[in-house]
Amino acid sequence: MLYQDYGTWLRAELGSRIQKISIDAGLTCPNRDGRVGWGGCSFCNNRAFSPEYCREGETVTEQLELGKRFFARKYRDMRYLAYFQAYTGTYGDVERCISLYEEALSVEGVVGVVIGTRPDCMPDELLDYLERLNRRTFLVVEYGVESANDATLKRINRGHTYADSVEAVNRTAVRGIRVGAHVILGLPGEERTDLLRQAAQIGHLPLTTLKLHQLQVIRNTPLERQWRTHPWPMPTVEEYIDLVIDYMTAFAQSRREALPALPPCVCERFVSSSPASLRLAPQWGLKAHEFSAFLQKRLEARTLMKNNLKL
C-alpha cells in the first residue's frame, strides 16, 4: 500500500465528514520581514492558494463562519478543521499565536486545528503548548519542507536547510503530535533522479501526512521573472502522474525500511490548481479529484502490466 487516502483517514480519526477551512491570521514570514531574508519564497503569491472567504483583516472567527457557510451546502453533517494556511502559522509572539488557535477552537463545529509553518519557526515554548493541545483536540503541524536539496532551498529563497526540516519534524513527532510535510515537485534545477532520491530521504521522517503538488509558475512572483527569462519545460499530466507514482513508491519503500511500525503515510494531495488568472504554467485544466482519478487508473494499469510480466 503506497499511501492512505486523506479524506478516509480524517473520517476514521474524527468520526464524520471533515472540511478544512483556510485562515489568514495576519501573520508573516521570516524571509519576508528580514529575519532570514526579503521577498518571500520565489514561487509564493499568497493569493494563488487563498480561497475567497480567507481574507486578512477579518478575525479568525469571521473567516471560519464564512468558510462554514461556503461549505455547508455540500453536506449537512460536516465538521471542520481550522487551517492556519497563510504565510507562517507559528511565527510571531507565542501568546498571540496561542490565542488565535484557541479562538478557532471556540467556533462551533470546529473539531481541530491544522497549522502550516516553516521548520525554522517552532520555538520550544510553542511546542510545549502544542503538545498539551494535542491531548485535547485533533492537531496536525504541517511543515513546508519543499525540497531535501539545500541548493534548491537557497535558489528558491526559503531561508532554511533540509537539516532544519529533519530537526523540526523529529522534535514535533517525539511529542506525539501528528506531523505533515509539504513538498513541491519540479522546482528549478531538480531532475527526476533528484526527486526520487528525495522521496527516499523524506520517507525516513516520522510523518503522518504528506502533501505533494507540482511546481506552478504564478504571476507576480520572482519565479515568474525567472521563467520568462529562461523558461524550462513543464511536464505533461501523464509525465507528472508517472513521477508521482514513482515518487510515492520510493517514499513508501523507504518508510517501510526505516519505520516499519508505522502505517502507510496519509497523502493529502498530489496536485494543486491556482486560479487561472494567476497561473502561467502548467495549464493542465484539471481539478484535484480529476487528477486523483487519472492517477488511480494509471497506478492500476501499471500494476496489471507488472503482474502480466511476471506470468
Image: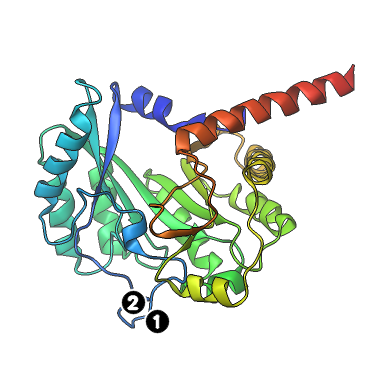
| Residue 193: assigned label | none
- Please, is residue 95 above or below residue 199 in the view? below
Residue drawn at 64 percent across, 40 percent down: 241
**Which residue position holds label 2?**
32
Residue type at mark 2 is Arg
Could you say which disc has been placed on residue 37 in the image? 1
- At 27% across and 69% down in the image, what residue appears? 28
Please tell me which residue is depicted at 19% across the width and 64% down the height of the picture: 26
Q: At numbered mark 1, what does the secondary structure look like: helix, strand or loop?
A: loop
Instruction: Work out whether residue 30 can be spotted.
Output: yes
The answer to whether residue 103 is left or right of residue 9 is left
Counting from the top left corner in percent of width and height, residue 188 is at 61, 67
What amino acid type is highlighted by mark number 1?
A: Gly
Verify CB contact (< 8 Å) between mark 2 and mark 1.
yes
Query: SS at mark 2?
Result: loop
Measured from the top left, where is residue 57 in percent x and y?
A: 12, 61
